[in-house]
Image (tube, rainbow, N blue to C red):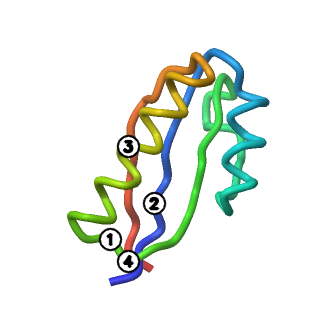
């Protein structure tokens, strides 16, 4: 099932993270508190695809010195 997935980050180089994420097709917007960013994409999620997202988010957190706050998925 296609889901909208949101990944939240705070701190660090949010501009660099935002640029990298947008280059990979993610929509980027400020988080609700205004102290971070929310990366959003729509995809069909299974265990293998989820592992790819998990690796990517943790890798970006390390690369840009950000704090990965977690994710949320919303069925359309």
Mark 4 sits on what residue? 44
Q: CA distance from mark 3 to mark 2?
A: 15 Å
Residue at left offset 49%, top offset 21%:
67
Residue 60: image location, x then y, percent: 54, 33
Residue 54: image location, x then y, percent: 35, 46
Q: Kindly indicate the quadrant of the structure image that contains residue 74.
A: bottom left
Q: CA distance from mark 3 to mark 1?
A: 14 Å
Asked if the residues shown at circle 2 and circle 4 are in contact, with their CB atoms under 8 angstroms apart, the answer is: no
Q: CA distance from mark 1 to mark 4?
A: 4 Å
Mark 2 sits on what residue? 5
Residue 53: image location, x then y, percent: 40, 53
Task: Give the residue furthest to the left.
Answer: 47
Asked if the residues shown at circle 3 and circle 2 are in contact, with their CB atoms under 8 angstroms apart, the answer is: no
Foreground mark, 3 or 4, reads 3
Under circle 3, the secondary element is helix
| Residue 56 sits above or below residue 73 on the image | above
Asked if the residues shown at circle 1 and circle 4 are in contact, with their CB atoms under 8 angstroms apart, the answer is: yes
**Relative depth, front residue between 67 and 74:** 67
Q: Is residue 11 left or right of residue 73?
A: right
Answer with mark 3 or mark 4, whichever residue precedes in sequence: 4
Asked if the residues shown at circle 2 and circle 1 are in contact, with their CB atoms under 8 angstroms apart, the answer is: yes
Image quarter of the N terminus: bottom left
Answer with mark 3 or mark 1, whichever residue precedes in sequence: 1
Q: CA distance from mark 2 to mark 1?
A: 9 Å
**Relative depth, front residue between 71 and 20:** 20
Badge 3, how many Cα within 10 Å: few under 14, some, many 20+? few
Mark 1 sits on what residue? 45
**Relative depth, front residue between 32 and 53:** 53
Residue at left offset 50%, top offset 22%:
62
């Amino acid at each position: 099932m296609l889901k909208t997935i949101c990944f939240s980050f705070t701190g660090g180089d949010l501009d660099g993270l935002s640029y990298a994420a947008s280059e990979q097709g993610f929509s980027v917007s400020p988080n609700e508190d205004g102290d971070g960013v929310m990366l959003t994409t729509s995809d069909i999620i299974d265990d293998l695809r989820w592992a790819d997202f998990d690796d990517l988010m943790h890798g970006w957190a390390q690369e840009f010195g950000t704090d990965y706050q977690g994710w949320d998925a919303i069925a359309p």
